[in-house]
Image (cartoon, grey):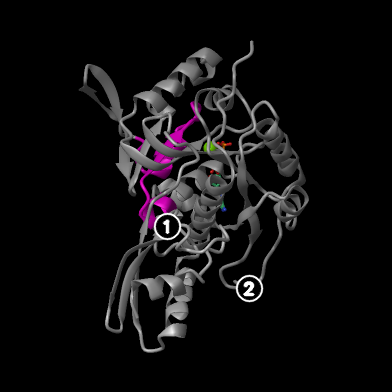
Amino acid sequence: MNKETVLKALRTVTEPDLKKDLVTLNMIEGLEVSENKVRFSIVLTTPACPLKEHMKNDCTAAIRKEYPNAEVEVSFTSKVTSHQNKPALSNIKNIIAVISGKGGVGKSTVAVNLAVGLAKSGAKVGLVDGDIHGPSIPMMFGVQNEKPNVVERDGKQWIVPVEKFGVKMVSIGFFVDPDKALIWRGAMITSAFTQIMNDSDWGELDYLIFDTPPGTGDIHLTLVQNYSVTGIVIVSTPQQVALADARKALSMFTDQQINVPVLGIVENMSYFSPADMPDKKYYIFGKEGARNLSAQSGIRLLAEIPIQEEVCESGERGIPAVFDDKHPLQTAFYTMAQNTAQAIAIRNATLDATKIVEINQ
Ligand SMILES: Nc1ncnc2c1ncn2[C@@H]1O[C@H](COP(=O)(O)OP(=O)(O)OP(=O)(O)O)[C@@H](O)[C@H]1O
Ligand SMILES: [Mg+2]
């Protein structure tokens, strides 16, 4: 057994999403072979990769097929991919916008748990709250009374994001008097938003999650006109009205002139299971609406999140479900984050960089 023969065995292991072998994809690093011991790392495209154990098992099996007594030690590292060779906005590899057609369907809940879930997996994550009308994200983070600091560096003022649960977060709500938010005009919103994006001290980020207001408005246009957005995640409840609005919002992003990839749909409030009858599911808002939309449109269904009182409570307590080991939906939200990370990696491996939308006025 030597490095060459081990690599030969590893060439038979396929990355399930990218459909190429791990050696060709340069995913094997630090290979050491001595007597009957083999040690190496698999370089993942995201630390939140849901298939990592699967790949580890496949590698071990491939080596043991040739060398039944080999001791195989596999560890993981990750290099999060970007769709751009050189990310435009400082060092942010991926910008993900969480959108919905209808209001109140759970965008902010999804954005928070996505950001915190990715951070929990080991990724570097930022979160922007793009809603000027209500500071819902600061409340879900339990930082509604904090104000981000401003520091001066190289003659420029930088906003220092509030850091919690491993996520760097900035909210437009921090800078707007909520009582005056309603009189903000489009231009003011746009400039506040670009300032937050450009003047925050993000450092290096694998993912910047952007929570948007419902529908498609100034903020959404500003986003696609100024930044190359990796993709969008759409949130809907199974209700027909919500799904109809989701389709409308989707049509804006998939319009030829805008053309931002859709990473998937999260169905929220899919069903209710009483605590004393966990196997029983009540489909309060209708059944499998997003699953059907997914089947018709070919857009991936990333998660079906049930309705649980605890989701609302954790929003108010300021501890996201995915961070809370006692939360009944911790796994559901973590799986959602893993599936989204996987969808981003596939998007980056298969599609070109998203073009910034030209402004024609
Ligand atoms: N799966 C769930 N189970 C129970 N309550 C939920 C669930 N998802 C969200 N909620 C609650 O529903 C309310 C609306 O959720 P959220 O603020 O995330 O929606 P939104 O789409 O961001 O709303 P808006 O359009 O106003 O920005 C919140 O009180 C939240 O705690
Ligand atoms: Mg919201």
Judge whether residue 207 can be spotted in this image. yes
Judge whether residue 119 is colored magenta: yes
Q: On the picture, is 187 further left or further right than 215? A: left
Question: Mark 1 or mark 2, which is nearer to you?
Answer: 1
Count of residue discs: 2
Nearer the observer, 97 or 283: 97
- Report how far apart the C-alphas of labels 1 and 2 lie in the structure: 44 Å
Quarter of the picture holding the N terminus = bottom left
The part of the chain drawn in magenta is 116-144
- Mark number displayed over residue 279: 2
Residue placed at 44% from the left, 56% from the top? 322
Q: Is residue 88 above or below residue 316?
A: above
- Mark number displayed over residue 26: 1
Density class for disc 1 (Cα within 10 Å; few <14, some 14-19, many ≥20) is few
Residue 356's x, y, as percent?
55, 26
Q: Is residue 23 above or below residue 256?
A: below
Residue 300's x, y, as percent?
65, 52
Residue 64's x, y, as percent?
43, 83
